[in-house]
Amino acid sequence: MVTEPVLKLYANEYDPLKVEDNNKLEDKHLQLLKDIGIFGIQVSQEHGGMDCNNTQYARLAELTCGNDLGISVFLGAHQSIGYKGLLLYGSKEQKDKYLPQLATGEKLACFCLTEPSAGSDAGGIKSRAVLSEDGKHWILNGGKTYISNGGIADYFTVFAQTAVKSSSGEMKDKVTAFLVSRTTGVTSGPKMAKMGINASNTTEVYFDNVKVPVEDVIGSVGDGFKVAMNILNNGRYGMCCALSGTMKRAIEIASAHANNRTQFGNKLASYTGIQEKIARMSMLHYTTQSMAYMLSGLMDSGMKDYQLEAAISKVYASEAASYVVDECLQILGGMGYMRETGVEKMVRDVRIFRIFEGTNEILRLFVALTGMQSAGGHLKEIQRALKQPVANLGMIFNEGTRRIRRSVGLDAPDLSEFVHSEFQQEAQQLSKNIIAFSSAVEHLLIKYTRDIIHEQILLNRLANATIDIYTMLVVLSRVTRALNKNISSADIEKNMARVICSEANLRIDRNLRSLRSSDALRNDEGYRTIAKDVLTNNGIVHSHPLD
């Protein structure tokens, strides 16, 4: 009922290049989107929405982004993060008052977190809200930047510092989330000129003594950080789904060109170099799509703690999509560089997703440090036990035995019962990778203790190993389903899964070994020294080859 009219809209009514020329969506496009109901995909029918679950949302995101990432950002800024706080934390009164207008597209929303001095550091925001003397309003002051829909939104989900009394009675600054109406005096700057996603409106937004009724706090006072993080988790999941659609479209364009273009007397598709490109693009798409629907399925099943999976999926999808669209352009050659194919637009549009909603660098640190938490807690127990060796002899003996068993692979989790019989070898390797990861984490914590937070080069490698372990997990899950259900594409999926797992194994081994390698550590020190010299001099410092 929904996918067909969406496909017809993009096929018959929507021209991404024309929208880019106009630097905005046309009114007729907005009306068509409203008629379909696309502004309220996950809002209940009671409030005028489509009442779709996360998996259905993922499907619609794929369809949209196969046509234009700009319109996807416009729609996502509205509902994936713009009014998502209302869906997750809004009171009944707030939902009844605001959602009907937002779900139909009568009113638009946006998400205001980023500030000029606080990019990915959500805890470092400077905007502040102070309770009025009569206790009826919060007086909000501050500014936000790079806000998608900032110049056209009617409602703003805004995060600001507020004074909150702690359990000890002290007043401390904590972030609070507010739903703010433009009618209260919110102003915005001109539309920013961007590299891509020009169908979306991006501006600065300003709050100058804006009065926000106390009943428009989203969640509880002081809980804004939690609200923001959970909204962003939803946004990251949506981005993974969206980029799957972009990659699918790029692969279709590249395949059609390779099958029809003749070079040196042969079709491009006959050259093994092109075949490798198409294969890698397809495997990246398969993995990204697998992550998207694994995550949407977990969310629909009621899972609440999926922030790690969302972060991994966002990092993987944004980097995979960048690779895929770039290779698509390369396969098309000069034609791809020309504007009319739409591929150069895809290359520009996709670039922002490695920055959106937490840069990939910050998310890699999050992934690595999250993976260390359990091991860190366990090591603290052992350290405490070693201070009283006689009283804790049993614990110490068990730990020694556990490490010996792990070193020979005896404590590896048994995944064989969950994986199809044709992939038992890959399942065993995944189990060994999990053990090797655990060992690497313990090594880093023992060697660096709390200072590991400063070893970001090492943490990046640990994060990359984590991402590859998760890649193997979701791909084995999907190919097992395909084989068990005898899906028509099962043989194709089987071939992709084998190569995906094989290459992931190689990367995991390389990244985890490098955490203990003296050569790798020496190179790391070299990186630091080179960077320090260049940064000290604000640029290149070596002599010119002609000097």
Image (cartoon, rainbow, N blue to C red):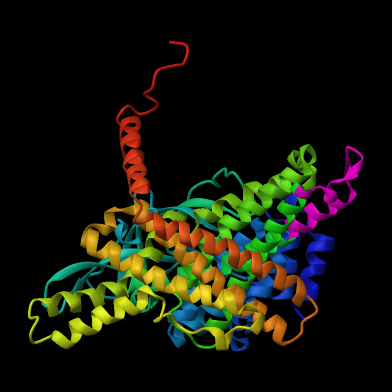
Quarter occupied by the C terminus:
top left
Residue 142, given in percent of the width and then of the height, sits at 34, 55
Residue 299, given in percent of the width and then of the height, sits at 53, 82
**Magenta residue check for 262:** yes
Residue 488, given in percent of the width and then of the height, sits at 80, 79
Answer left or right for 74 relative to 209: right
Residue at far top of view: 547
Residue 359 appears anywhere in the view = no
Residue 39, given in percent of the width and then of the height, sits at 63, 72
Answer left or right for 68 relative to 476: right
Question: Residue at coordinates 14% horizontally, 85% vertically from top-left?
Answer: 393
Q: Is residue 423 above or below residue 509?
A: below
Q: Say which quarter of the image contains residue 369.
A: bottom left
Question: Residue at coordinates 40% horizontally, 81% vertically from top-left?
Answer: 410
Which residues are drawn in magenta?
249-272
**Magenta residue check for 14:** no
Answer left or right for 213 relative to 261: left
